[in-house]
Structure formats: C-alpha cells, structure tokens
Image: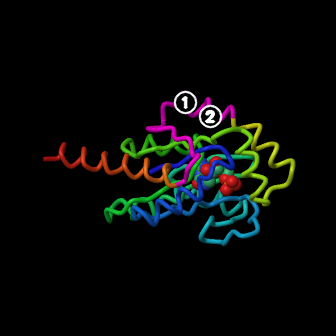
C-alpha cells in the first residue's frame, strides 16, 4: 500500500492509524535528510550519509528511490519482500516518483494520494509542526500544486482523498482495501 501527498497533508498520522487498524507494518525508508526534533532513528527513517545511501542503492537494496526537496529517500527492498512473502500488509509513505517505481514491480499495490483541505490549512499544519525552517516551508508549499497535478497525470493512484477528517480518511482507505481483498478472493475461487 502506498500513501503519498504534499508536505503537511497528514501522511504520517494517517499511516500510524492505518498500521494499528489494519494491522500493517510501516516501511522505514532510508534518507539523507537531517533528523528533525521528535523523530527517532529506525522508527521514522534510517538517517544515513549520502555515501551509505549510495552503497545500499548500488548494492540493489532498494525497491525504489527518489530525490525529494534536495535529499535522497529510498525504500529498503528486503522488509517489503519479507512482509509480502509472509502475507502481511506493508505501508510505504513515499513520493510520486517512488510510487511509480513501486507500481512497476507490484502492479497490484493500492496507492492513495492525500489532498489538503485547502492551501491555508496545509500551511497551518506545516507551521504547527515547527520542524522546518521558513525557507523550507516556502519550498514545500510551492511544490504542492505541481505535485497534485503530476499525481493526477501519473495515473498511478487508485484514489485521491481530501484529508479533512482523519477518521474519515482512515475509514475510506480501510474500506477500499477490504473491497479489494474481497474482490481478489472471489476472483481466486
Ligand atoms: P519528509 O522529509 O517530510 O519526511 O518527506 C519528504 C517527502 O519524501 C514526502 O513526500 C515523503 O512521502 C517522501 N518520502 C519519504 N520516504 C520516501 C521513500 O522511501 N521514497 C520516496 N520516493 N519518497 C519518500
């Protein structure tokens, strides 16, 4: 399962809730971005140097990777393979370029793109987070429009969900997954 969306849309909270409710495992990405206050190494991300990132990537250890806001991010391949082999669900919180790469490998992945209720609400959420410098906030807001357009054009997402109510968003995703599972089961009979 892939969750994407512009900065400040509430992806991490939605992922946390989905992991508990489904249940599902969260795919911990590698990143070269510096750790933020409140983040934990190994839980939010594996924070690595650009050299370490490159070593893992060249060694074939990543399912996908992309440069976002000037830093590298990538999904380690092995935990995804293991979860799927063992019949567990796994959630990837990744950008559009990553989602497109995942689709090439796992065509049946379900991909959701979260939309902010409004640009004002998105700005408020990023500022409330108090983790990014003003220039970084401006950069992230500036990219949002283009990202949303690109997400529509990519044809990669099964659903676009306006995240104005956390419970409603989580419910919508769970119901979609349950419908898909039921559909797969009846197709397999
Ligand atoms: P942040 O720095 O706010 O945690 O994340 C910035 C962006 O990178 C978000 O759009 C997030 O979804 C994306 N991202 C996080 N991990 C990965 C990953 O492993 N691969 C890709 N392609 N994007 C990621």
Specify whether residue 78 is in view: no
Residue occupying image coordinates x 68% and y 66%? 47
Q: In front here: 6 or 34?
A: 6
Whether residues under marks 2 and 1 lie with C-beta atoms below 8 angstroms apart, the answer is yes
User: Magenta stretch containing residue 151, yes or no?
Assistant: yes
Task: Give the residue pinned by disc 1.
Answer: 152
Specify whether residue 139 is in view: yes
Q: Secondary structure at mark 1?
A: helix
User: In the displayed image of the protein, which residue is found farthest to the right?
Assistant: 134
Please tell me how many numbered marks the rendered image carries: 2
Q: Is mark 2 within 8 Å of ligand 1?
A: no
Q: Quick one: label 1, few (<14), some, or many (20+) residues within 10 Å?
A: few
User: In the displayed image of the protein, which residue is found farthest to the top?
Assistant: 153
Q: In front here: 39 or 130?
A: 130
The relative height of residue 60 versus residue 46 in the rendered view (above or below) is above
Q: Is mark 1 within 8 Å of ligand 1?
A: no
Residue occupying image coordinates x 52% and y 41%? 161
Q: Picture quarter containing residue 55? A: bottom right
- Residue 142 % position (x, y): 77, 37
Residue 58 falls left or right of residue 182? right
Residue occupying image coordinates x 80% and y 42%? 139
Task: Give the residue pinned by disc 2.
Answer: 148
Q: Secondary structure at mark 2?
A: helix
- Residue 9 % position (x, y): 64, 48
Q: CA distance from mark 2 to mark 1?
A: 6 Å
- The span picked out in magenta is 145-166
């Amino acid at each position: 399962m892939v969750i994407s969306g512009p900065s400040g849309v509430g992806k991490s909270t939605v992922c946390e809730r989905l992991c508990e409710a489904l249940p599902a495992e969260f795919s911990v990405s590698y990143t070269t971005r510096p750790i933020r206050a409140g983040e934990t190494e190994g839980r939010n991300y594996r924070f690595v140097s650009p050299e370490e990132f490159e070593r893992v990537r060249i060694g074939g250890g990543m399912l996908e990777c992309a440069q976002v806001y000037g830093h590298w991010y990538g999904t380690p391949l092995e935990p995804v393979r293991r979860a799927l082999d063992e019949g567990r669900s796994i959630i990837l919180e990744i950008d559009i370029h990553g989602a497109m790469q995942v689709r090439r490998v796992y065509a049946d992945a379900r991909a959701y793109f979260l939309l902010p209720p409004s640009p004002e609400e998105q700005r408020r959420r990023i500022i409330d987070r108090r983790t990014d410098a003003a220039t970084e906030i401006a950069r992230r807001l500036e990219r949002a429009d283009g990202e949303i357009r690109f997400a529509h054009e990519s044809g990669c997402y099964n659903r676009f969900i306006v995240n104005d109510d956390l419970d409603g968003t989580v419910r919508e995703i769970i119901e979609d997954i349950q419908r898909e599972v039921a559909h797969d089961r009846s197709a397999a009979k």
